[in-house]
Amino acid sequence: MKWAMVAVIVGSTVLADLLQSHEMKRRAVKLQDLRPDSWGRVLVSLARRGPLVIAVFFMAISFFAFMKLLSIADLSFAVPVTAASVVIETLLAKLLLREKVSAMRWAGACFVACGVALLAV
């Protein structure tokens, strides 16, 4: 059961982050839009952007699955093991979003993967 929750958390986190990154790169919020007098307009604009709404939905799934995981597993297991999303997101950012990933970032992702593997033992 706990590994199923980990899979739900990692999968939903990855989907949320990819959708959010893709949509924000497509049409970013401008700095002048962050003034307090324009927050309402910005929120309405963001709510009309389907991929962002879906990203929020996946973030909620991740949050509630994490709460369930904490009820059946130790925090010292739950937090590090869900970092597997970092590894998957780095790979998918390279493949799907066509981001440039430096050797240092690849090394970091590999270290995270090693840590997750150690937790799985």
Image (cartoon, rainbow, N blue to C red):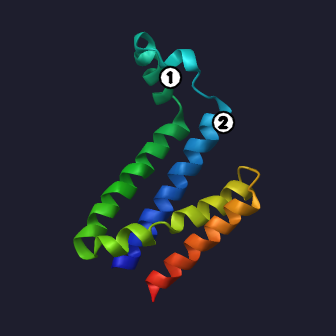
Q: Are marks 1 and 2 in contact (CB under 8 Å)?
A: no
| Real-space CA distance between mark 1 and mark 2, rounded to the nearest whole angstrom | 15 Å
Asked if residue 93 is positioned above or below residue 21 in the image, the reply reads below
Dot 2: what SS? helix
- Left or right of 60: which side holds 118? right
As drawn, the residue found furthest toward the top would be 37
Residue 67 occupies which quadrant of the picture? Answer: bottom left
In terms of sequence position, does the residue under pointer 1 or pointer 2 come before the other?
2
User: How far across and down, in percent of the image, does residue 45 sit?
Assistant: 50, 22
Dot 1: what SS? helix
**Residue placed at 56% from the left, 62% from the top?**
86
As drawn, the residue found furthest toward the front would be 104
**Could you classify mark 1 by the number of other residues whose Cα lies within 10 Å: few (under 14), some (14-19), or many (20 or more)?**
few
Residue labelled with disc 2: 25
- Of badges 1 and 2, the one in the foreground is 2
User: How far across and down, in percent of the image, does residue 92 sit?
Assistant: 67, 59
Asked if residue 55 is positioned above or below residue 109 in the image, the reply reads above
Q: Nearer the viewer, residue 59 or 90?
A: 90
User: How far across and down, in percent of the image, does residue 73 sit?
Assistant: 28, 76
- Which residue type does callout 1 highlight? Ser
**Residue placed at 68% from the left, 68% from the top?**
107
**Residue placed at 53% from the left, 63% from the top?**
85
Residue labelled with disc 1: 45
Image quadrant containing the C terminus: bottom left
User: How far across and down, in percent of the image, does residue 49 sit?
Assistant: 53, 31
Q: In the rendered structure, find residue 116 and report the number of the disc placed on it.
A: none
**Residue placed at 62% from the left, 67% from the top?**
109
